[in-house]
């Protein structure tokens, strides 16, 4: 039974990330292809199906839009377009909210999700990993009246959902690890031990999934009755 448990868990730890990765990529490709209208598909343009044509078309349009929006004329057109959307009541609220979030997260010089931090949540004495998203401003900063920062506390094992908190800067400890390493630690529920940025520069990497399974098996063996452990 122990043999089955050890290698079955090892197999799961190898296959689960691979299957989820393939599923996410397939979902992303399917979403991008669904954006392309029917008259622009390869079947309509050339008479036969070309795999990946819609994805390349979407990526090309996004790249071309970025090139046009980077110059003065393109920026003027974008500003006019945003002014037009700003006059539509329902669309204005949705567009402005999404634009603010995307500008903050995707901006090259932005600081959102650039640092992993350690915070006490959900109670004093219980620690978890969070990500620095910025600092309160405007009325909120005036009401708080101190040096506060904004953090995002992701849930485990799904980091896409979580909690937004504003905490005193002195209560937050900045971690010497990359955001990727912190995410791996969160998704693995603490199984895959993170390493610091300095350790990565020295050539040390985080523990692999197979090693994690072996550690689980070793821990199970250590606590088995008859080995001297309580």
Image: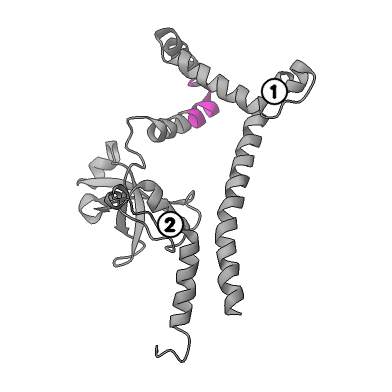
Looking at the image, the residue that sits furthest to the right is 47
**Quadrant where the N terminus is found in the figure:** bottom right
Which residue is pictured at 43% across the width and 35% down the height?
A: 101
Element type at mark 2: helix
Q: Measured from the top left, where is residue 90 in percent x and y?
A: 54, 29
Q: What percent of the width, then of the height, locates residue 82?
A: 47, 19
Q: Residues within 10 Å of mark 2 (few under 14, many from 20)?
A: many
* Image position, residue 127 (x, y; %): 33, 63
Q: Is residue 78 visible?
A: no
Q: In front: 118, or 44?
A: 44
Q: Nearer the viewer, residue 54 or 170?
A: 54
Q: Quadrant of residue 230?
A: bottom left
Residue designated by label 1: 37
Residue 186's disc is: 2
- Which residue appears at 63% of the width and 35% of the height? 29
Position above or below: 81 against 94: above
Q: State the mark number for residue 179.
A: none
> Which is nearer the N-term, disc 1 or disc 2?
1
In the image as oriented, which residue stretches furthest toward the front?
Answer: 203
Image point (46%, 92%), residue name:
226
Q: Within 10 angstroms of label 1, few (less than 14), some, or many (20 or more) residues?
A: few
């Amino acid at each position: 039974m122990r043999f089955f448990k050890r290698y079955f868990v090892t197999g799961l730890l190898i296959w689960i990330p691979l299957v989820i990765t393939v599923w996410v990529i397939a979902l992303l490709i399917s979403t991008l292809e669904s954006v392309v209208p029917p008259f622009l598909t390869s079947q309509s343009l050339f008479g036969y199906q070309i795999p990946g044509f819609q994805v390349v078309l979407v990526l090309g349009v996004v790249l071309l839009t970025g090139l046009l929006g980077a110059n003065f004329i393109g920026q003027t057109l974008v500003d006019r377009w945003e002014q037009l959307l700003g006059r539509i009541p329902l669309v204005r609220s949705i567009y402005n909210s999404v634009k603010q979030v995307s500008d903050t997260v995707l901006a090259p010089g932005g600081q959102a999700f650039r640092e992993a931090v350690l915070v006490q949540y959900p109670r004093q004495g219980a620690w978890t990993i969070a990500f620095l998203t910025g600092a309160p401003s405007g009325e909120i900063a005036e009401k708080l009246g101190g040096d506060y920062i904004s953090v995002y506390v992701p849930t485990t094992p799904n980091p896409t959902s979580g909690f937004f908190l504003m905490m005193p800067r002195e209560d937050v400890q900045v971690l010497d690890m990359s955001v990727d390493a912190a995410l791996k630690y969160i998704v693995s529920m603490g199984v895959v031990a993170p390493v610091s940025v300095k350790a990565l520069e020295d050539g040390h990497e985080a523990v692999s999934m197979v090693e994690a399974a072996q550690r689980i098996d070793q821990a199970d063996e250590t606590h088995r009755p008859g080995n001297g452990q309580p």
